[in-house]
Image (spheres, grey):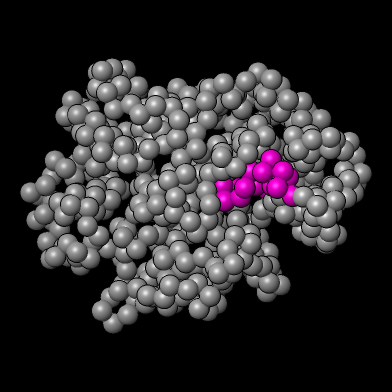
Amino acid sequence: MKRAAGILMPISSLPSPHGIGTLGKDAYRFAEFLRGAGCSLWQVLPLQPTSFGDSPYQTCAAGALNPYFIDLDFLVRDGLLTKEEACAADCGEERVDYGHLYRTRIPLLRRAFARFDGTRPDWQAFLDRGEYRDYALFMTLKEEFGGAPFWQWGEYADYDAQKIARFERTHSEEVQFRQFTQFLFLAQWRRLKAYANARGIQIVGDIPFYVSRDSVEMWKYRRELFVLDEAGNPSEQAGVPPDAFSETGQLWGNPVYDWAKMKQSGYAWWRDRIKRALSLYDILRIDHFIGFVRYYSIPEGETDARIGKWNKGPGKELFEGFEHAPIVAEDLGLITEEVRRGIDEIGFPGMKIIQHAFDGNPYNEHKPSNYTERFFAYTGTHDNVTLYSRIHGTQGWERERMLGDLRSECVKAGVPLRASSDRAVCRTVVKLLYASPAAAVIVPLQDVLYLDDEARLNRPSVVTESNWSFRFHRSDFSTAVKERLRTLAAESGRLAK
């Protein structure tokens, strides 16, 4: 691809008076901001419904879409809600309050459904396709059983087509309502994506590697997809051993895939999932891509992530036919030479994080001078501290080493070093990233604005209310910031045409 620049902006972090960012007017304003900034890429986080911990990487339905992102003002415009109804559930424009959303958003959408014209041909065709029926049934059953996990659903705990069909007949309105949320989301998403594309902006989407234990996939497909014990329960759980984020490793708790079983169907579930994601986005980032080469599993019930083992993944054969698809591999983490060879064999562009570059090692693959055009390069991801906090928190001999590395990289790239303050160092690092050989550079808006760790999106392996809740204000999309980014894009040959 041509040299490009973009911003990482989760939908949830957009401004909105309705408690969370949506696919509404502020998303369109952000698309205009990107165009004015000379950017051609907008990276979002997964759009799936969240479950425990509100993480978009812990989804209860890999093929569904998050109803919280449906814009209420557009529903008012379409006559499905009144302005008073939409505003009655507001909870401000600061951090996302997921508890408030849980209590108020679905009842509002039910009101919209009650006023919706169910005879519309496009709606009937949507129902006939049945793409979101499993999700709708799962959520209806969860509602019926008071939010309990599926293994506490009595006779419905094991998916039985005949029993489910009977349940659907007696709960048809609720099942259709849950499908209605997907219908609304898709309509709003497609309009937004078309608007962005018409302005030269491509959407970089993201899908998690794993699904939650309490998920549609575990409920309906667990015997075909996951490693189970004799009773049909997960016998292994996902995680990682000690790494840069945790001295004791991370215990994610997701069920792990049974790749031998999946191979028998030609990895049909994964391949279908990728195809559907590619229909939603222009470019697809797959999280935890190293799991396709090797993955770490921990015995079910174990509470220490250090007690686990490495296993071999499916490798290249899962991606046959996708060789030229616009896919980016999130290849960060514990990378051995064997894993690197496996990822390179699959062939998708990988990722580099400039935050990790300044450690005194000239062979560090995150140093811009070691990039090639095969990479998407970032200042940081949703899991990292903000760039400002990284720089501000680096003191003493480590700071001297960092500045020495930064000076050397700046000389190689022909970028002037500015180090009079932490903000000046941030600005230099972003400029250096733009000047790098990487095909695409993507910067979280937090790093463009020099925000500290109060603006951090996620702290891995920690469940806290501050995770996934940070939001921006309209004033953050200022003309001064836009012009600064546009200058960077022009100077580095990344200006969108």
The residue under the point 11% across, 47% down is 171
Tell me if 101 is positioned left or right of 207 in this view.
left
Residue sitting nearer the eye, 374 or 49: 49
Please give left or right for residue 352 compared with residue 292 in the image: right
Q: Quadrant of residue 78?
A: top left
Residue sitting at x 58%, y 63%:
246
Could you say where residue 482 lies in the image, as x and y percent from the top left? 67, 23
Please give the name of the residue rendered at 52% of the width and 56% of the height, measured from the top-left corner. Answer: 460
Quadrant that contains the C terminus: top right
Is residue 213 positioned above or below 459 on the image?
below
- In percent of width and height, residue 259 lies at 45, 73
Vertical side of 464 occupied by 257: above or below: below
Residue projecting furthest to the bottom: 230
| Residue 274 position within the rendered picture, expressed as x and y whole percent measured from the top left | 47, 54
Q: Is residue 48 left or right of residue 436?
A: left
- Compared across the picture, whether 71 is left or right of 309 comes to left
Residue 52 visible? The answer is: yes
- Does the magenta portion include 63? no
Residue at the image point whose x is 15% and y is 51% from the top = 144
Which span is picked out in magenta? 374-394
User: Of residues 64 and 466, which is closer to you in this image?
Assistant: 466
Report the residue that reaches farthest toward the front: 396
